[in-house]
Amino acid sequence: MRWNCRIIAFGIAHVKTGLRGSEALNLSPSSVEKFDRKPVLSIVGKGNKRRLVACPERLTEKLKAFAFEKKIDQGEGFFPINRFRACEILKEASNKAGFTKTIYPHLLRQSDAIERLRQIGNPEALQLHLGHSPTVIAVRYLFNPHPGGSCQNQPGGSV
């Protein structure tokens, strides 16, 4: 596998923002915004509903710098791959990292949800962050986190 900044950014964007696979693949420089002086990603999710997703400042800085360096246009995607290739990349990366669990895009989303809920303890805030319609979907992370916890509990360190 040829490792590059885009592959690494794809994985980090997933695990640090909890985006759906399709949402991560559709990220572009125009997705990176500020809200109340804090970095966010403007996402169009299921049902063409727009939402703002909190994003670590370091990640937004890296994405902006990458777009500038590679001359990526505002509407051009950071990750010009399809969802099948994204799954292959994550599988190859998890094998290389020594994870015993198969890593796939939705597991990264679930890992973010579990960690975020542990930190904030507010299912309604998690619901908004993930773009879930019914609160009950977000609440399930309180009572039944993904078997084995998050990706961050895997041998070989955190994702």
Image (cartoon, rainbow, N blue to C red):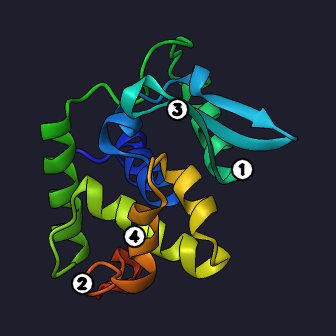
Q: Quadrant of residue 45?
A: top left
- Taking the spot 41% from the left edge, 75% from the top edge, the residue there is 141
Of callouts 3 and 1, the N-terminal one: 3
CB of mark 1 within 8 Å of CB of mark 2?
no
Q: Amino acid at mark 2?
A: Pro
**Residue receiving disc 4:** 111
Residue 107 percent coordinates (x, y): 28, 64
Where does label 3 land, which residue?
Answer: 43
Query: What amino acid is found at the position of numbered circle 4 in the picture?
Result: Ser
For the residues labelled 3 and 2, the Cα–Cα distance comes to 28 Å
Disc 3/disc 1 C-alpha distance (Å)? 17 Å
List the single residue furthest toward the right: 37
- The one nearer the camera, 19 or 98, is 19
Question: Residue 31 sits in which quadrant?
Answer: top right
Find numbered disc 4 in the image and state the secondary structure of the residue it sits on.
Answer: helix
Residue drawn at (20%, 30%), measured in percent from left and top? 82
**Residue 80 vertical placement versus 41 (above, below):** above
> In terms of depth relative to the viewer, which is nearer, 112 or 135?
135
Label drawn at residue 57: 1
Residue at image point 27% right, 53% down: 105
Please say whether residue 1 is visible from this viewpoint: no
Disc 4 from disc 2: Cα separation: 11 Å
**Disc 1 on helix, strand or loop?**
helix
Nearest the viewer among 124 and 34 is 124
Instruction: Say whether residue 85 is left or right of residue 69.
Output: left
Percent coordinates x, y for residue 56 in the rendering: 66, 54
Name which of mark 1 and mark 4 comes first in the sequence.
1
Residue 35 drawn above or below residue 129: above
Quarter of the image that includes the C terminus: bottom left
